[in-house]
Amino acid sequence: MFGSTLSRRGLLGGLACLPWSPLSAQELQGLELREVELKLSSDPAPATRLWSAGGTIPGQILRARAGGQIALRVTNRLPQTTSFHWQGLRLPNEMDKVQIGPGQSAQLRFTTPDAGTYWYRPALWPQAAEQKARGLYGLLIVEGRSEPQVDRDMTVVLDDWHLDEAGQIKADFTNQTDVTGPGRIGPLLTVNSKPVPQTITGRPGARVRLRILNACSARLIGLLIEGLRAIVVSIDGQSCEPFEPARDRLPLGPGARFDLILDLPPEGTPATLSARGAGLRREETSEPNQPLLILKGQGSPVSPREPVRSGQNPDLPEQLRLQTARRMELTIAPTGSEEPGRYWGFNGMAGTGTDTPALFKVEPNRVVTLAFINRSPLAHSIHVQGHPMRVLHQLDDGWEPYWRDAVIIPPGRTVRTAFLANNPGRWLIESTILTHGANGLVGWYEVG
């Protein structure tokens, strides 16, 4: 059913296809940050004033080849200083989180070493939560030398929006219920900034690659796949051995990316990707599932495919020497502080960047294990900058067969990860639930 060689044929409709004309490594392209207006829901809803990178929401799709280079001139036409973190991308520390004030420009040049799906989003705390909620983010697609062959390569960006009665972004970014609770979760859920569900239509058996990003500020999405077989080929930008999701479900924390390859179903056979009603919460609810994508086959079928082929990134270590690792424990809990912006913390310490003592320092090329201990009644999603991680098994020294740049820690649970500290600099460890990050759940570590 699934295969690796295929001509780019088959008519598909619905979501936009990625244009695959890679940029020259020498070309300096502009990226303007400015206010735009966009209708997020159907008439008669008004257009919403949003902040954009490149005039669209999500922002301009940046493209490169593995081993190539991105060259940008970023101009800030917004009223706040901002910076971007390139989540999941292995890049030099000095190219991450470059600050750009209102009316200023900055040039960024960096190599894109690994093929995969990445995103750029605001990184300057605490402003990052507001800026992202206003729409300031975009995708970076890095094409590898050898990619699974598909008929259509498509982006699926999930976001939710909290609008006021006038249809504008609700400016309650310090809402105490969100700060102490699960974060800012908007009731208006969209795919590529369009109302859900969206539809993909094409010939039965046509092969589609979906690059799925959860761009929500706080929503933990349990993605349910119904009516077809989907294969995961990449997680958080790093390729992996192909596998089918257990029970046809995927957990998407904020900022998570999953690349799926699927063949469109036979004509008349319903197939959907939905957000589970209970999401990733522990308790069960009667809330119905929310369809996000409807996939339809129409017309004459294409020929059956061979199995999908993919594999691990050979530039990442095959083995991690856990026996000699630097072992760290990071407890996630309220700090007990009543100071604004200091509600959450690691090991009792709230931060907004490198304004607090380092959580730890480690010499280059040493393995680090991190135990994230959740002492709160809420699920948390934690991102480690600078290094992809393995998720460790609970009962032995093994690990999951894929790399992550963030992990979800359920209430009252501990999740352990490991990485090779080979990228020098000061890197953040931060909540991807941006309301929590803006209120203290940010720390840092140093390699070097």
Image (cartoon, helix red, strand yellow):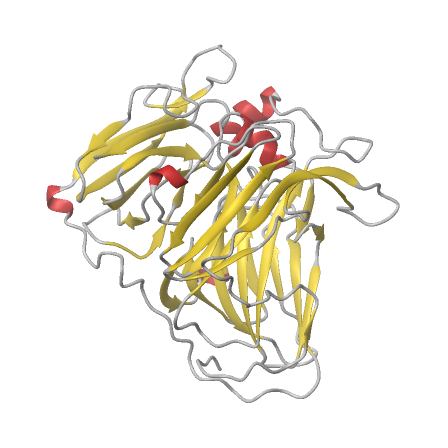
Residue 296 occupies quadrant: bottom right
Residue 416 in the image: x percent, y percent?
28, 42
Residue 93 in the image: x percent, y percent?
34, 39
- Identify the residue at the far right of this view: 44
Q: Is 382 placed above or below 243 here?
A: above
Horizontal side, residue 375 vs residue 153: left or right: left
- Identify the residue at the far top of this view: 338
Q: Is residue 273 visible?
A: yes
Total numbered labels placed on residues in the image: 0
Q: 209 or 447, which is in the foreground?
A: 447
Q: Is residue 384 visible?
A: no
Name which residue lies at 41% across and 33% down: 430
- Quadrant, the C terminus: top left
Residue 214 in the image: x percent, y percent?
54, 48
Q: 43 or 142, which is in the foreground?
A: 142
Name which residue lies at 44% across and 62% down: 245
- Identify the residue at the far left of this view: 324
Horizontal side, residue 146 vs residue 128: left or right: left
Residue 173 occupies quadrant: top right
Q: Is 27 placed above or below 38 here?
A: below
Residue 269 in the image: x percent, y percent?
66, 76
Horizontal side, residue 209 vs residue 175: left or right: left
Name which residue lies at 42% across and 56% down: 69
